[in-house]
């Protein structure tokens, strides 16, 4: 590489997102990049000319290993929607003037659907105006909903945490007996895709029966049918554990969480803030049957639990970071690195690059055949798909009994 590289992180962070950042940095330096800049708070920060020289923070191999084990976005993230080019050309002129000033050869953006929209727009503008900078997307999202890739870095670690946590909740739920039983509702992230919620099935094994019910947003949610199933389960056992996606909706399209409260906050991409699904269903069941209920919202824990990372996930996150730099160095632009599963036994996965125009603003949902006919659980095919992604552990670097992270002062 003859110029410099700039990398940013966008959207919701993951336990593996910084492993991709490490892969970008190391590969760029190995390929001869003079400087590797990091955007502070994504494209939004770049517009404010906020960036750092990553070599001031990653000074040795230990820093690289700490970065791989550090949750959340080391550089800071954003949810900033670039306008269409014809709507505000000045924004693009400002971005490209900054890239010119920094002598940027490759622009790498680590993120999900909305971040790939940014790569698409910037690469289109570069083509139209003749700018030499190349733009490549690096996949990241615990939601696992990016098109054309077998899975996304970040998902495996989140799935591992969810399977582990649900198993521990199940174990805890049998410790105390209540006269009319106990129903625990575990709310898991997922607006339109149920990949995370389906991972609750990983709790099932020789020593655990797994959650009793699993509800994904792909299937319309029927409260009466749900109530009947819970009633039948309570007649057979003292404790019932249910995993639900935050985004489950009724047949008329309303989110279940909206039944208990209004949803006022909407982000730059028009996404409603979803929260309260478990609370609503727990209150509903308590009112129906008079049993004890618990609403458990995993919230940000499922994406920040780096102490429960999947080794496969961390390695693949590093791999796609490096592949993104390699693709840009070899002339690709307007592309995203994807993971292609080569085999399940033994598990093998490689990388390719795909046109970001076929990925941005699209969503990959759980196939209907991977959900049971009545919509209350996932099938063995789903479990077979996700299980290889949670294998192996990444031991934290412990200092005084607590994991050490790579730290950047805000």
Image (spheres, helix red, strand yellow):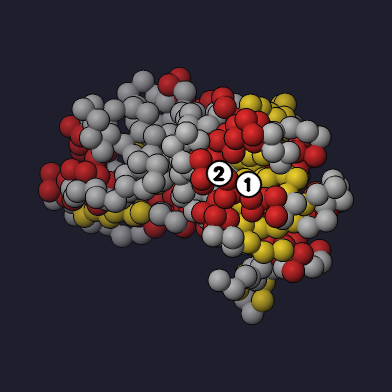
Please tell me how crowded label 2 is: few (under 14), some (14-19), or many (20+) other residues with Cα within 10 Å.
Answer: some
- Quadrant housing residue 35: bottom right
Q: Nearer the viewer, residue 18 or 207?
A: 18
Q: Which residue is mark 2?
A: 92
Left or right? Give the position of 267 relative to 3.
left
Q: Residues within 10 Å of mark 1 (few under 14, many from 20)?
A: some
Frontmost residue, 71 versus 114: 114
**x, y percent for residue 128:** 62, 30
Say if residue 235 shows up in the picture.
no
Q: Are marks 2 and 1 in contact (CB under 8 Å)?
A: yes
Q: Quadrant of residue 209?
A: top left
Residue 85 seen anywhere in this rendered image of the structure: yes
Gap in Å between the C-alphas at discs 2 and 1?
Answer: 6 Å
Residue 5 horizontal side relative to residue 153, left or right: right
Coordinates of residue 110 in the picture (x, y in percent) = 61, 46
What residue is pinned by disc 1? 96
């Amino acid at each position: 590489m003859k110029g410099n590289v700039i990398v940013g992180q966008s959207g919701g962070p993951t336990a593996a997102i910084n492993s991709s950042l490490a892969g970008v940095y190391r590969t760029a330096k190995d390929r001869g990049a003079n400087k590797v800049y990091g955007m502070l708070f994504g494209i939004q920060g770049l517009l404010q000319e906020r960036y750092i020289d990553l070599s001031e923070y990653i000074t040795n191999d230990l820093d690289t290993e700490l970065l791989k084990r550090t949750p959340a976005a080391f550089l800071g993230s954003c949810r900033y929607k670039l306008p269409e080019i014809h709507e505000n050309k000045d924004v693009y002129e400002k971005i490209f003037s900054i890239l010119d000033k920094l002598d940027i050869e490759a622009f790498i953006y680590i993120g999900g659907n909305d971040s790939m929209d940014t790569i698409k727009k910037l690469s289109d503008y570069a083509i139209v105006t003749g700018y030499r900078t190349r733009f490549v997307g690096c996949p990241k999202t615990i939601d696992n909903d990016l098109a054309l890739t077998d899975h996304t870095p970040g998902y495996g670690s989140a799935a591992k945490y969810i399977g582990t946590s649900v198993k521990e909740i199940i174990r805890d739920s049998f410790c105390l007996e209540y006269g009319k039983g106990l129903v625990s509702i575990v709310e898991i992230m997922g607006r339109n895709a149920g990949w995370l919620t389906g991972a609750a099935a990983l709790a099932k094994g020789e020593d655990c029966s797994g959650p009793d019910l699993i509800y994904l947003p792909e299937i319309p949610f029927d409260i009466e049918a749900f109530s009947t199933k819970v009633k039948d389960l309570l007649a057979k056992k003292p404790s019932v554990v249910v995993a639900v996606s935050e985004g489950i909706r009724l047949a008329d399209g309303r989110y279940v969480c909206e039944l208990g409260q209004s949803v006022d906050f909407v982000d730059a991409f028009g996404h409603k803030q979803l929260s309260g699904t478990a609370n609503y269903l727990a209150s509903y069941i308590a009112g129906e049957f008079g049993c004890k209920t618990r609403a458990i919202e995993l919230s940000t824990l499922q994406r920040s639990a780096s102490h429960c990372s999947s080794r496969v996930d961390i390695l693949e996150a590093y791999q796609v970071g490096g592949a993104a730099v390699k693709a840009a160095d070899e002339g690709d632009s307007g592309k995203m690195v994807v993971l292609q599963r080569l085999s399940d036994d033994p598990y093998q996965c490689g990388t390719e690059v795909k046109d970001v125009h076929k990925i941005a603003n699209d969503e990959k949902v759980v196939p209907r055949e991977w959900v049971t006919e009545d919509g209350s659980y996932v099938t063995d095919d789903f479990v077979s798909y996700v299980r290889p992604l949670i294998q192996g552990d990444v031991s934290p670097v412990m200092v005084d009994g607590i994991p050490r992270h790579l730290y950047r002062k805000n």
